[in-house]
Every structure is written in structure tokens, then in C-alpha cells.
Image (cartoon, grey):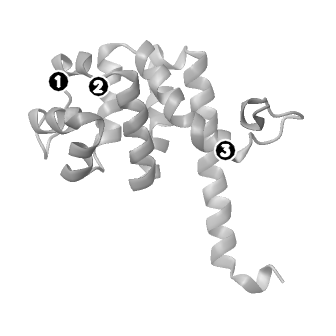
Amino acid sequence: MNPTTEPSEGGGDPPPARNGMAIPELVAEVYETALPTDRGHMLEQLLRPLGVLSLVAIADGVFAKIRFRGGWQEFHVRLEDIPNVQSADIVALVDHAQQVSVEAVDGLARLVLMSPGLSGSAAAMVLVGLLLQRSRQRRVEGARDQAGPERDA
């Protein structure tokens, strides 16, 4: 039995592995059900912090092509580029983006909540919950780190 697939009991935090593993898949699921304009906004959020080498390395360069066609400074995803992006591409993009800028992925929570089309999805609400929880956890850990080791003693 795989412990990361069982739901958390007692209203506690989800298992750490689920927290890290579920986010890329949830983003892909939300992306698949989103309207094209929302898909474009999601891609813009995720692509902005990534450099050229990252974009070329992910999903056979599909995101590099989108980024270069959309402009570098005033970046906007073109609607004709959206059908070229598959769920597996989104999973790879989110997985990489989390390593480069977890804030870019966490910013999807705000984007989802601001979009009436996205905020109606159950997967989107689960995603927002996980992103907000992860953000709070990082703030708590950051505060703990700033307090110094003498507080742990």
C-alpha cells in the first residue's frame, strides 16, 4: 500500500510527499479544464522566471518556442500556442518551475482565485489549498530559521 495516496486523517496536513508530488499533477488538471485565456495566464505565470536553457530543456522546447513568439520583455502567450501544450508538458513545467521559483507556482493560487472560470473547479480549489498551505509552511520555517538555533535548545 502506498502511504502517499491515502487521505490525511483528522484534518491534519497532507503527507509531505503528497504536498510535493500532487501540485504538478493538479496544475495540469486545472490547466486541462481551463478556458484558453486562463491557460495562457497560467503559462505566463509559470514561464516568466525561467531562463532560455530551462525552457529549451523542458517538454522538447515547446515552452521556449512559446516564450520567443510571445516576446521576452512584454511576454504574453498567444492563443494559437496553447493547443501545443499537453498535460505532461505542464507537469514537467511545474516540476521545474518549483525548483527555480516556488513563488511562481504559488502565484497560481491568486490567479485561480481571481478567475471565475478556474475557481469553480474542485481540482483548482484543492490546488489553491495546497499552495496556500505550502506558502504558510515556508513562512513559518523562515521565521524559525531567523530566530536562530538558540530557540531550538
Q: What residue type is labelled 3?
A: Ala
Residue located beneath label 3 in the image = 17
Disc on the earlier residue, 3 or 1: 3
Judged from the image, the secondary structure of the residue bearing numbered disc 2 is: helix
Q: What is the x, y in percent for residue 7?
A: 78, 29
The residue mark sitting in front, 2 or 3, is 3
Residue in the image at 20% along x and 18% along y: 79
Say whether marks 3 and 1 touch (CB < 8 Å). no
Judged from the image, the secondary structure of the residue bearing numbered disc 1 is: loop
Closer to the camera in the image, 8 or 57: 57
Marker disc for residue 40:
2
Residue located beneath label 1 in the image = 78
**In the image, is 24 to the left or to the right of 20?**
left
Does 11 appear above or below 88? below
Say whether marks 1 and 2 touch (CB < 8 Å). yes
Q: What whole-number distance in Å separates the C-alpha atoms at marks 2 and 3?
A: 29 Å
